[in-house]
Amino acid sequence: MEKKIPIALQNLNYNEGQVLLIDKPYKWSSFQALKKVKYSLKIAKIGHAGTLDPLATGLLILCTGKKTKEIDRYQAQEKEYTGTLVLGKTTPSVDLEKEFDAEYPTEHISSEDLEKVRKQFTGEIEQTPPIFSAVKQDGKRLYELARKGQETEIKSRIVHIKELEFTNTQNFPEIDFRVICSKGTYIRSLVRDIGTALHSGAYLKALRRTRIGEFCVENAWQIENW
């Protein structure tokens, strides 16, 4: 397949510093997306401002050259996501990376229950990162420990959910949602905890990051064919 690198990106001064918005493809790791851009555009120094899970898509901010000094500033900005959670089943990874490991009832869940749990998880909440995550604990990433079968006590954190909206419940137990949240929020943890609060289980079927601060995915580059 012929590579189609946009002309607008071919003559930029990447050493001086650029901020590139990328729409990360499904099943690509954030590092794979960064590596694709790095070698396609022959960039010497590049970093990303916030990891996306391989099964998630959407906005990934890449900083090059002198702009890499600004990565922490972009990482600190609020994020917006849209996605689909499914009640009644769980997986160890809380998404479709792993096989289902348990089933739970959903018949008892009413629209009133959904509204109650939506309010419960809006504002400041305490959250424990999923075991299959890139969070470092005692110098090792949690997913490395999980894949070795090692148990560890994961430290919780306080995060802020600015908005949580259930945008479509017509296909219950599938629920479409939109969330605006602070740095450090794990959407898989949010989904897991919603399932628990509803006396059921839940997993994340789909996730897309649509915004970081003022940057929107609609303005991001598609990189599959680069």
Image: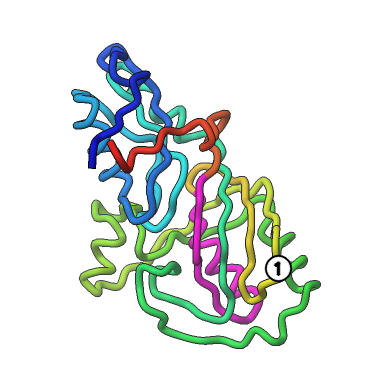
Q: Is residue 112 above or below residue 30?
A: below
How busy is the neighbourhood of tag 1: few (under 14 within 10 Å), some, or many (20 plus)? some
Query: Which image quadrant: the C terminus?
Result: top left
Q: Is residue 33 above or below residue 66?
A: below
Q: What residue occupies the far front of the structure in this picture?
A: 2
**207 and 186: which is toward the camera:** 207
Q: Is residue 202 magenta?
A: yes
Quarter of the rendering containing residue 87 = bottom right
The colour scheme of the drawn protein is rainbow
Q: Which residue is depicted at the point 24% across and 55% down? A: 140
Query: Which image quadrant: the N terminus?
Result: top left
Q: Is residue 46 magenta?
A: no
Asked if residue 130 lies left or right of residue 172, the reply is left
Q: Which residue is depicted at the point 24% across and 69% down? A: 147
Quarter of the rendering containing residue 49 = top left
Asked if residue 24 lies left or right of residue 170, the reply is left
Q: Which residue is depicted at the point 72% across and 80% down? A: 109
Asked if residue 173 lies left or right of residue 49, the reply is right
Residue 37 in the image, given as x and y percentages of width and height: 27, 33
**125 and 86: which is toward the camera:** 86
Q: Is residue 17 above or below residue 63?
A: above
Q: Amino acid at mark 1?
A: Thr
Q: Secondary structure at mark 1?
A: loop
The magenta span reads 185-209
Q: Which residue is depicted at the point 63% across and 52% down? A: 178
Give the residue at mark 1: 169
Asked if residue 9 lies left or right of residue 176, the reply is left
Quarter of the rendering containing residue 46 = top left
Residue 112 in the image, given as x and y percentages of width and height: 80, 72
